[in-house]
Image: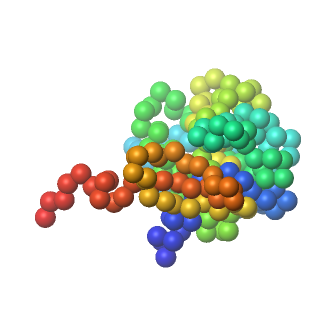
């Protein structure tokens, strides 16, 4: 059921690094992105796919993990992603590319979940460092990085508490909790 797929698609930040992700799997995820709508059909996004250890290390070094978990510097080596998709915008001055970015990133992550994987969209990153590592031209904008692998953490959706905090957190057992607003709070009006 589609709802189950969406609910299983969480921002996973800890993975079983010993479980590889095949390059053909990443290519299949890009194929899903290729099928997505694109504003004015400009299709400005390009993708760098990485399963190589050296490139994965360089990508990992450029990422910032989980801003609300201030006492955590990111996954330990055994829990790092096995693969990455770097999403590059070739039309940096075109504001509608951001819509393509969201649609394609979500579609690829849903595809990953369907394959028994999980991932995390990461926008807090050292773009200049990644651009240099991959020798990208200055007009190419690194928009997002998708970190992918076999999740080893449990992520639970919980209601936003009475104080209204939306900060995600981990409990003493390491379970990651993500507060979500209620449907009632999200709907401004209903007109029939």
Residue lying at the far bottom in this picture: please name it: 1
Q: Is residue 52 visible?
A: no
Residue 174, horizontal then vertical, whole percent = 69, 56
Left or right, 38 with respect to 113, comes to left
Nearer to us in this view, 36 or 72: 72
Left or right, 61 with respect to 121, comes to right
Residue at x 72% of width, y 53% of height: 14
Nearer to us in this view, 159 or 23: 159
Residue at x 74% of width, y 56% of height: 15
Residue at x 72% of width, y 27% of height: 129
Residue lying at the far left in this picture: please name it: 192
The way the protein has been coloured in the rendering is: rainbow
Left or right, 17 with respect to 152, comes to right
Is the residue 151 above or below the residue 46 in the image? below
Q: Quadrant of the C terminus?
A: bottom left
Is the residue 130 above or below the residue 114 in the image? above
Nearer to us in this view, 130 or 189: 189
Q: Count the labels in the image.
A: 0
Q: Is residue 117 visible?
A: yes
Residue at x 86% of width, y 41% of height: 54
Residue 170, horizontal then vertical, whole percent = 63, 52
Residue 147, horizontal then vertical, whole percent = 68, 49
Residue 132, horizontal then vertical, whole percent = 74, 26
């Amino acid at each position: 059921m589609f709802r189950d797929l969406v609910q299983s698609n969480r921002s996973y930040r800890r993975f079983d690094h010993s479980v590889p992700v095949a390059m053909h799997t990443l290519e299949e995820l890009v194929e899903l992105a290729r099928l997505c709508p694109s504003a004015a059909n400009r299709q400005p996004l390009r993708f760098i796919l990485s399963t190589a250890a050296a490139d994965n290390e360089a990508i990992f070094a450029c990422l910032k993990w989980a801003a609300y978990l201030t006492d955590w510097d990111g996954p330990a080596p055994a829990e790092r992603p096995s693969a990455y998709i770097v999403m590059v915008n070739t039309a940096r001055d075109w504001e509608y590319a951001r819509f393509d970015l969201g649609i394609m990133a979500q579609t690829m992550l849903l595809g990953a979940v369907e394959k028994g994987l999980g991932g995390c969209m990461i926008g807090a990153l050292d773009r200049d460092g990644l651009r240099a590592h991959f020798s990208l031209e200055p007009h190419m904008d690194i928009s997002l990085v998708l970190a992918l692998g076999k999740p080893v953490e449990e992520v639970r959706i919980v209601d936003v508490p009475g104080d209204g905090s939306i900060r995600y957190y981990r409990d003493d057992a390491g379970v990651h909790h993500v507060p979500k607003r209620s449907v009632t709070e999200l709907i401004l009006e209903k007109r029939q």
